[in-house]
Amino acid sequence: MWNWIRDIEDAITPLLQRSFGVRCVHCRQQMAENRLSLCQDCYIELPQVIRAIRLESPYLKGAWCMGTYRSPMGSLIRKGKYASQQGMFIQLAEMLAGAALDLPAFDAVISVPLPEQRMRTRGFNQSALLAQHVASMLDLPHHQILFRVDNAEQAAKSLVDRGVMLTGRFEVRPHFEKGFSPPKILLVDDVFTTGATAESCALELLNLGVQEVWVLALVSGK
Ligand SMILES: [Zn+2]
């Protein structure tokens, strides 16, 4: 329904940029040239390597990310999501895949499914896109094994509620239910906040017989 607005936006943006210059998507300063919608100062802040996220979880063995949500990388994710820019995530996926070469060995890569409504409005699942690139770089299979059974945003719930929350948010697609249990799985997502989403996914995978679930995200934090 809103495609015509995007068409107009796409048509006038280059004209506005020629007239008024472009602003960095992170620090908002005007810039003559840009790479990935970032000024030179913000671009060089983009991380090249992954680091471990400190976490205590009965379901997740460990987690890594590249940067923080408030960093230039976080701004690129927000722009990619809210402006539905698949191209932005392809570039971020290439960065994540390159950094993933430092990871230990895994048996398969899994992505986090989007709520159906969001899939319809955005047109792509950024988690699946990131997972595809990481799996290809690590020469591993990528499985879209999970689906959402609701789209409730429950990430902010307290730890006490988590036992209840963890049941029923994701389910395994029926054709994966029998015989799918690679020992060590890497779950890939764009943002790792409280870990509640990753834990919900991990719970379903562990119930299948998977032994270890690890997480790789572009950024951590809120
Ligand atoms: Zn900047």
Image (cartoon, rainbow, N blue to C red):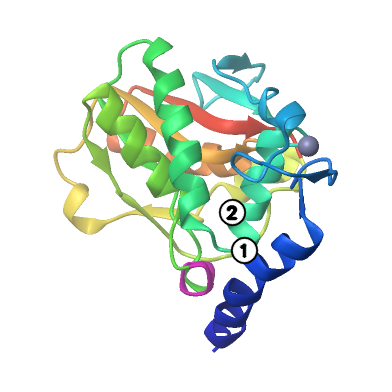
Amino acid carrying label 2: it is Gly
Question: Where residue 150 appears, x then y in whole percent?
Answer: 52, 66
Question: Where residue 43 appears, x then y in whole percent?
Answer: 67, 30
Specify few, some or many for label 2: CA neighbours under 10 Å numbering under 14, 14-19, or 20 or more. some
Is residue 67 in view?
Answer: yes
Can you tell me which quadrant of the image ligand 1 is in?
Answer: top right
User: Measuring 33% from the left and 22% from the top, which residue is drawn there?
Assistant: 211
Is the N terminus in the top left, top right, bottom left or bottom right quadrant? bottom right
Q: Is residue 53 above or below residue 79?
A: above
| In magenta segment, residue 139 | no
Q: Regarding mark 2 in the picture, which secondary structure is present there? A: helix
The image quarter containing residue 7 is: bottom right
Point out the residue furthest to the front here.
19
Amino acid carrying label 1: it is Ala
Is 182 left or right of 67, judged from the image as shown?
A: left
Is 207 left or right of 71, judged from the image as shown?
A: left
Q: Which stretch appears magenta?
A: 118-122
Question: Where residue 186 appears, x then y in whole percent?
Answer: 38, 28
* Disc 1 to disc 2, C-alpha distance: 6 Å
Assess whether mark 2 and mark 1 are in contact (beta carbons under 8 angstroms). yes
Circle 1 is placed at which residue position?
Answer: 83
User: Measuring 62% from the left and 41% from the top, which residue is drawn there?
Assistant: 196
| In magenta segment, residue 120 | yes
Q: Which mark is residue 80?
A: 2
User: Measuring 64% from the left and 26% from the top, which residue is drawn there?
Assistant: 46
Point out the residue furthest to the left here.
179
Main secondary structure of the magenta stretch: helix
Is residue 193 in view?
Answer: no
Q: Regarding mark 1 in the picture, which secondary structure is present there? A: loop
Specify few, some or many for label 1: CA neighbours under 10 Å numbering under 14, 14-19, or 20 or more. few
